[in-house]
Amino acid sequence: MGLSTHVLDTMNGCPAAGMHVELFKTEGERALSVKKFQLNADGRSPDGMLYSNQDLRVGTYRLVFGVKDYFLSRGVSLPAPAFLDRVSLDFGVANADQHYHVPLLVSPWSYSTYRGS
């Protein structure tokens, strides 16, 4: 249970190893940074869960993914300015007893997300 994320690079068909991610707790327009990390070789947080089941609370959150910097680090030629710089996902946790998995499928030109299991 708790909160987790996973990023897949759909341009290269692999996990987005090395991408920088930041997690925020949000309240209206306010956003408090909770954690910054770099994705591991599997495209996941190196510490596992972002929030454990006992620490996750009902409320709103934001994950910000460093898409532009990730693709530049992979040698992808991007226009200036890049079409996608940072992808920001705002989401809500309605039941803190459930697992919330927030995957991101991303390329330099598009992204998709959903509530995973």
Image (cartoon, grey):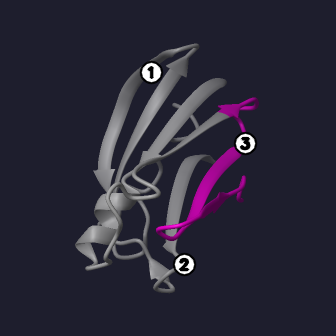
Q: Between residue 76 and residue 115, name the one nearer to us.
A: 76
Q: Are marks 3 and 2 in contact (CB under 8 Å)?
A: no
Which residue is found at the position 40% from the left and 52% from the top?
A: 85
| Residue 98 on image: x %, y % | 73, 42
The type of residue carrying mark 3 is Gln
Q: For the residue labelled by badge 2, is the local secondary structure a helix, a strand or a loop?
A: loop
Who comes first in sequence, dot 3 or dot 2? 2
Q: Amino acid at mark 1?
A: Ala
Residue in the image at 65% along x and 36% along y: 91
Q: Mark 1 to mark 2: distance in Å?
A: 29 Å
Q: Which badge, 1 or 3, comes first in the chain's sequence? A: 1
Lateral position of residue 101 relative to residue 77, left or right: right
Q: Is residue 70 left or right of residue 23?
A: left
The amino acid type of the residue labelled 2 equals: Thr
Mark toward the start of the polypeptide (1 vs 2): 2
Q: Position of residue 117 (x, y in %)?
A: 71, 59
Tell me, for residue 31, which label it has, or none: 1
Classify mark 2: residues with Cα within 10 Å, few (<14), some (14-19) or many (20+). some
**SS category of the residue bearing label 3:** loop
Of labels 1 and 2, the one closer to you = 2
Instruction: Write down the residue under mark 3.
Output: 98
Residue drawn at x 54%, y 78% is: 10
Q: Which residues are magenta?
A: 92-117
Give the residue at mark 2: 10
- Say above or below: 55 vs 103: above
Image x and y of residue 34, in percent? 37, 31
Horizontal and vertical percent position of residue 25: 49, 25
Question: Disc 1 to disc 3, how far (Cα)?
Answer: 23 Å
- Would residue 51 be seen by someone viewing this image from the given angle? no
How far apart are the two marked residues, 3 and 2, measured between alpha carbons?
28 Å
Which of labels 3 and 2 is toward the front? 2
Q: Is 74 situated above or below 92?
A: below
